Image (cartoon, rainbow, N blue to C red):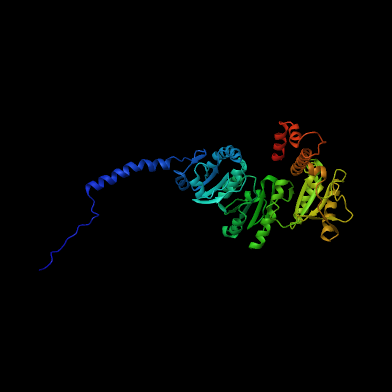
């Protein structure tokens, strides 16, 4: 007997009831989705994120700066107003950057997901990819650093107006390199390598006025600009990577660097020796005349870094090179950036800052240095008084005083008492009961 044919009907055929349920669910969920997307506005305010909206915020913004903080953290409290100041400026950039914060102490699961182990932890999210931030935290410096960080590696400029807009937006905190008539590929690798230290661009179309303004005569040319020092220089090749990199490294610093605690950090990765000129007071008019001579010498000796410091401005640093209030200044030495320096033979005071004679003396010093007529010395530590006035010195002196006080207190506790009639308990009781815990507390605290 033949088997009956079985017919089947697809289980995916939509019924009116199923369609009604599906549309109802979409209708109910759509407001939640829309509200999740619309709750973030780039209005210059610091966004507050938590487990429920963090991923949505990271997805919405191409660039977002996130502060993982704890309410009880002192550093976090100091950072908060700086972020409030920076947020509206960052939101108004050509490449807007959102600023957000997460109470990582409260939302610990979210903090754990992003490996937060201290407060505050700052992270930059670029298209959802996080990078830890170790830059400055003051509002103005933070804005400058982030604007630089998120900028294109090489900006292509196609008009005079674009060139002017680029240099204005770049500000004065970083040197600016503009390749006139160069292809983007010529400087791209080096622009990526030195992105954190300078702005890079190439100009395709520009007028003769731009050539006059930037002081170059032919193309291709690579111009280096230091806005804060009002300095410019031009490189005409050869445009091979080695030579371009040498020029970039030399041009990251101004011709003559004012030496301070902050500027010394910029020397960390530079292997060149430093020609240090020590002045009495770097703000005096005669000091400015010396600096003009040093700029000319620096232009002719790009394998060295030229810097200056005023004894009045930073005496402790000057004392490292055997300079004190009795030393005839200006004085010039060549420092290796570590523990040694060279001084020209029979030349305690190398330059005297008197008009035209200054130039002759500086060039004589450089000639003697190049010919090896120098004495190698080791830098000296600061004087005792200078050390004591420094923050570290103050701390050590206070610790020493506390240690002496502790020893005195302990010795007084165990000092032999004269023999008296009675028991040891009675002797112990002779000490004021109010004093005993006070002494114990002092020793424990120290």
> Is residue 301 or residue 347 the one in the foreground?
347
Kindly tell me whether residue 114 is visible in this rendering.
yes
Quadrant in the picture for the N terminus: bottom left
Q: Residue furthest bottom?
A: 1
Q: Is residue 34 above or below residue 206?
A: above
Say left or right for 292 vs 26. Answer: right
Say left or right for 381 vs 261. Answer: right
Kindly tell me whether residue 181 is visible in this rendering.
no
Q: Position of residue 105 (x, y in %)?
A: 53, 42
Q: Position of residue 371 (x, y in %)?
A: 84, 61
Q: Residue furthest left?
A: 1
> Is residue 231 or residue 45 the one in the foreground?
45
Q: Residue furthest right?
A: 346
Looking at the rendered structure, the number of numbered marks drawn on it comes to 0
Q: Position of residue 201 (x, y in %)?
A: 59, 53
> Is residue 215 or residue 335 the one in the foreground?
335
Rendered residue at 77%/48% (across/down) = 308
Q: Position of residue 312 (x, y in %)?
A: 80, 41
Say left or right for 183 vs 319. Answer: left
Quadrant in the picture for the C terminus: top right
- Residue 416 falls in which quadrant of the image? top right
Rendered residue at 80%/33% (across/down) = 421
């Amino acid at each position: 007997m033949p088997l009956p044919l079985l017919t089947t009907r697809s289980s995916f055929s939509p019924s009116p009831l199923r369609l009604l349920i599906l549309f109802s669910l979409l209708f109910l969920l759509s407001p939640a989705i829309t509200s999740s997307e619309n709750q973030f506005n780039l209005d210059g305010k610091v966004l507050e994120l938590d487990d429920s909206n963090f991923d949505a915020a990271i997805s919405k913004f191409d660039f977002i700066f996130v502060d993982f903080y704890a309410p009880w953290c002192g550093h976090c409290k100091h950072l908060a107003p700086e972020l409030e100041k920076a947020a509206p400026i960052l939101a108004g950039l050509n490449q807007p950057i959102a600023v957000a914060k997460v109470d990582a102490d409260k939302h610990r699961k979210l903090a754990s997901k992003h490996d937060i182990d201290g407060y505050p932890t700052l992270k930059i999210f670029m298209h959802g990819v996080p990078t830890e931030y170790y830059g400055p935290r003051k509002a103005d410096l933070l804005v400058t650093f982030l604007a630089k960080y998120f900028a294109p590696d090489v900006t292509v400029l196609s008009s005079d107006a674009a060139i002017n807009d680029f240099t204005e937006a770049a500000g004065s905190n970083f040197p600016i390199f503009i390749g006139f008539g160069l292809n983007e590929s010529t400087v791209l690798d080096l622009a990526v390598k030195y992105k954190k230290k300078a702005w890079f661009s190439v100009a395709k179309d520009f007028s003769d006025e731009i050539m006059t303004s930037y002081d170059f005569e032919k193309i291709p040319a690579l111009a280096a600009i230091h806005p804060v020092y009002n300095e410019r220089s031009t490189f005409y090749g050869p445009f091979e990577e080695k030579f371009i990199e040498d020029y970039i490294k030399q041009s990251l610093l101004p011709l003559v660097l004012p030496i301070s605690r902050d500027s010394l950090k910029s020397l960390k990765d530079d292997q060149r020796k430093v020609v240090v000129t020590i002045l009495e007071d770097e703000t005096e008019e005669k000091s400015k005349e010396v600096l003009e001579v040093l700029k000319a010498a620096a232009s002719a000796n790009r394998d060295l870094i030229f810097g200056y410091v005023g004894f009045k401005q930073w005496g402790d640093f000057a004392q490292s090179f055997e300079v004190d209030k009795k030393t005839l200044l200006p004085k010039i030495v060549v420092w290796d950036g570590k523990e040694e320096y060279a001084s020209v033979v029979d030349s305690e005071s190398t330059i005297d800052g008197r008009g035209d004679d200054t130039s002759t003396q500086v060039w004589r010093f450089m000639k003697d240095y190049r010919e090896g007529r120098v004495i190698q010395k080791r830098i000296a530590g600061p004087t005792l008084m200078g050390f004591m006035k420094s923050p570290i010195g103050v701390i050590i002196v206070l610790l020493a005083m506390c240690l002496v006080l502790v020893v005195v207190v302990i010795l007084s506790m165990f000092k032999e008492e004269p023999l008296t009639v009675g028991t040891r308990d009675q002797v112990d009781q002779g000490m004021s009961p109010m004093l005993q815990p006070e002494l114990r507390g002092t020793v424990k605290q120290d």
